[in-house]
Image: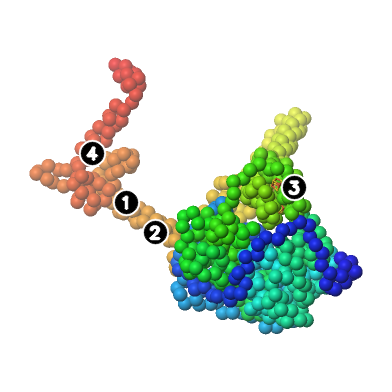
């Protein structure tokens, strides 16, 4: 940025941006002092962020949390979310979010305990002397995001100006325009907390070291201008600009203050210009000087349908329904409740949605205040929409392409540059809902973009897999060729040998193979964790190694006299049992008569005879057999004479024989004949 331009900016020159409109102001609440809303009975905090992933959830259902406690941890430039009051986590589930489509996403719900206990505040009292990284990290970790509506991560924006801008930050613009009709929360903040905002500006000045710092305020906010002029002496210049909608949009404001038109594909901070909303600057001051994470914000509650209107400080996550009921409105089914202003806001599909950092207004207008949309008619190509578009677009072209689902053409028309300011729809004599269509088109394009990204990632994965398979195939081929060449060479060599040489050579090869196998076996017994050089670490080796490690663990456990290792304990118990059974078997082996001993030895698997005893019952000698003495004597099922057992075994054999397939049975019978 050239010095003469900076000089002009410093001298107070202002420029005009293209297009714009002058809608009804509806700023009745600019005199309403900021109230503080009581804590609701349920807080719902959405986890989705403007940029990047949600972060890792740090809490579980049932956990108790305090106000300001981080609920997620986000690394890099991503921002965590914080509990906005103390209470118990009642759910981590998908809830309806404040969006025209009413889509659901992951939220953390807190059941407040009413105590509103806070995490201890951790102010950086010496912020003037600490390094920028500490301040930026504090801004990130305390959840500071743009409160003007865009919810862009403040720390990322500041870093971008420091790292990406060619000559660092030249102009810092504090946005106090609040051009949207009906919204007065920033106006009230400037009236009531001008000194705090000035401290926040001083922090940003310290971080960015801009050449010029300007607080831009529209000329319809007299009290705010006065308060800010007094408070900002020495830190910034207050610049009063004409009230034209949408002068508060970052690019339009940059044009007004600096005369520069920032291209739409470039971040403003990359041009060395940073624009921050007054609410965000206040949050920066609270995070650094007071040590408070961002857990609340000021919103305007306005519209003829409320019993009373005003500006109110609410905890993030408070439901719109709770706010409405506190302002005396229980809306009918068809009654419109708009989140945001009449130009950029949208009608809520349900009032059970939480207030987020992006929300600045809840509007419940009467049909007299904001008339219902009239019946739309065909475009008459009057060109009014193009004349008011601050992004220099041709809205009727974009609309027709989008309506025809011609997304590529809509993109070419510049849908990306549309800021959804609503100026075109406001002036359209045919009442065409241009902004609503553009919002829909942007959502579709986001969907298409994400699908393309997914497809590109999938293609990369497939290409990498094919490359890997190709390389493996090549390696296999090479190995095969080497082996064939080796065999061929060996055969050729053997062909030239005498029979004695051939035998000696084969003997030598055999011995080498044996030595190699022996070495491998020894290495395995030692529990080698890595394969011997030149060997393949196959599955059997792995199993053997695990067994060795297990054996070692058992020995160590035995040696140390404790059985903490459950595997070792189970193995030892198994060994002890096997040993005991063996001993018992040995002790009773001579109890059996020779014949039966032989049979038992031969037929253990069939008859399961391990014990034999002769008893005299009714003058008949019976032999008792069984698994063990007690078993044989006490279990009537096993009190069978040996002959009976043998017979039953023979019978079993017969049964088995009868189970043969019919064809085989016939064959057996024929052979017997
Ligand atoms: S203002 Fe409405 S009628 Fe006129 S050109 Fe634009 S879309 Fe068509
Ligand atoms: S909504 Fe988009 S197209 Fe319409 S005036 Fe605003 S920037 Fe231009």
Which of the pair 408/651 is nearer the observer? 408
Whether the residue under disc 2 has CB within 8 Å of ligand 2: no
Quarter that holds the N terminus: bottom right
Residue shown at 31% from the left, 39% from the top: 606
Which of the pair 296/507 is nearer the observer? 296
Closest to the camera, between mark 4 and mark 2, is 2
Residue shown at 61% from the left, 53% from the top: 523
Q: CA distance from mark 2 to mark 3?
A: 91 Å
Q: Are marks 2 and 3 in contact (CB under 8 Å)?
A: no
Closest to the camera, between mark 2 and mark 3, is 3
Residue under numbered circle 3: 383
The x, y position of residue 25, in whole percent, is 65, 64
Residue shown at 54% from the left, 69% from the top: 309
From the viewer's perspective, tell me whether residue 616 is left or right of residue 213: left
Q: Residues within 10 Å of mark 3 (few under 14, many from 20)?
A: some
The disc at residue 645 is 4
Earlier residue among tags 1 and 2: 2
Quarter that holds the C terminus: top left
In the figure, 379 relative to 485: above or below? below
Residue under numbered circle 2: 573
Residue under numbered circle 1: 585
Earlier residue among tags 4 and 1: 1
Q: CA distance from mark 4 to mark 1?
A: 20 Å
From the viewer's perspective, tell me whether residue 435 is left or right of residue 204: left
Whether the residue under disc 3 has CB within 8 Å of ligand 1: yes
Quarter-of-image position of residue 2: bottom right
């Amino acid at each position: 940025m050239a010095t003469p331009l900076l000089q002009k900016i410093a001298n107070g020159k202002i420029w005009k941006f293209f297009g714009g409109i002058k809608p009804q102001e509806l700023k009745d609440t600019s005199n309403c002092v900021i109230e503080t809303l009581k804590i609701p009975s349920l807080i719902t905090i959405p986890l989705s962020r403007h940029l990047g992933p949600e972060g890792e959830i740090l809490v579980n259902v049932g956990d108790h949390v305090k106000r300001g406690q981080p609920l997620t941890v986000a690394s890099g430039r991503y921002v965590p979310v914080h509990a906005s009051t103390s209470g118990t986590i009642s759910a981590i589930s998908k809830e309806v979010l404040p969006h025209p489509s009413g889509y659901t996403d992951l939220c953390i719900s807190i059941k407040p305990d009413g105590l509103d206990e806070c995490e201890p505040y951790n102010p950086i009292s010496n912020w003037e002397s600490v390094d920028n990284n500490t301040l930026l990290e504090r801004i990130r970790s305390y959840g500071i995001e743009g409160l003007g509506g865009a919810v862009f991560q403040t720390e990322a924006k500041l870093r971008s100006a420091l790292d990406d801008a060619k000559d660092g930050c030249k102009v810092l613009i504090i946005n106090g325009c609040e051009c949207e009709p009906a919204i007065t929360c920033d106006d009230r903040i400037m009236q009531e907390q001008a000194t705090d905002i000035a401290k926040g500006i001083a922090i940003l000045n310290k971080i960015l070291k801009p050449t010029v710092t300007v607080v831009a305020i529209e000329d319809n906010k007299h009290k705010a201008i006065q308060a800010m002029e007094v408070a900002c002496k020495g830190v910034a210049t207050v610049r009063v600009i004409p009230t034209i909608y949408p002068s508060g949009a970052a690019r339009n404001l940059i044009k007004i203050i600096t005369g520069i038109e920032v291209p739409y594909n470039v971040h403003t901070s990359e041009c060395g210009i940073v624009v921050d909303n007054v609410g965000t600057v206040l949050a920066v001051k609270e995070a650094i000087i007071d040590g408070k994470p961002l857990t609340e914000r000021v919103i305007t509650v306005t519209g003829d349908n409320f019993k009373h209107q005003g500006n109110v400080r609410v905890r993030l996550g408070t439901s719109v329904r709770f706010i409405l009921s506190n302002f005396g409105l229980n809306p009918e089914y068809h009654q419109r409740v708009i989140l945001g202003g009449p130009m950029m806001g949208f009608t809520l599909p349900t009032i059970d949605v939480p207030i987020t950092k992006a929300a600045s207004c809840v509007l419940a207008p009467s049909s007299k205040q904001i008339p219902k949309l009239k019946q739309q008619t065909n475009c008459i190509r009057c060109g009014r929409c193009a004349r008011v578009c601050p992004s220099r677009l041709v809205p009727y072209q974009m609309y027709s392409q989008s309506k025809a689902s011609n997304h590529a053409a809509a993109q070419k028309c510049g849908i990306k540059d549309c800021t959804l300011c609503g100026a075109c729809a406001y002036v359209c004599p045919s009442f065409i809902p241009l902004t609503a269509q553009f919002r829909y088109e942007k959502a579709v394009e986001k969907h298409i973009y994400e699908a393309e990204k997914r497809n590109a990632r999938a293609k990369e994965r497939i290409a990498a897999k094919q490359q890997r398979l190709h390389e493996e195939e090549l390696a296999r081929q090479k190995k095969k060729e080497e082996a064939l060449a080796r065999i061929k060479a060996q055969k050729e060599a053997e062909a030239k040998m005498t029979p004695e040489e051939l035998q000696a050579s084969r003997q030598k090869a055999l011995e080498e193979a044996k030595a190699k196998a022996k070495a491998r076996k020894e290495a395995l017994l030692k529990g080698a964790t890595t394969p011997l050089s030149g060997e393949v670490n196959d599955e059997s080796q792995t199993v053997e190694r695990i067994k060795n490690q297990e054996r070692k663990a058992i020995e160590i456990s035995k040696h140390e006299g404790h059985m903490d290792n459950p595997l070792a304990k189970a193995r030892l118990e198994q060994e002890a049992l096997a040993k005991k059974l063996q001993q018992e078997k040995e002790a009773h082996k001579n109890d059996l008569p020779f014949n039966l001993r032989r049979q038992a030895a031969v037929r253990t698997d069939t008859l399961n005879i391990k014990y034999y005893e002769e008893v005299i019952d009714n003058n008949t000698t019976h032999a008792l057999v069984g698994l063990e003495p007690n078993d044989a004597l006490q279990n009537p099922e096993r009190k069978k004479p040996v002959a009976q057992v043998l017979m039953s075994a023979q019978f079993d054999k017969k049964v088995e024989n009868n189970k043969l397939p019919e064809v085989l049975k016939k064959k057996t019978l024929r052979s017997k004949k």
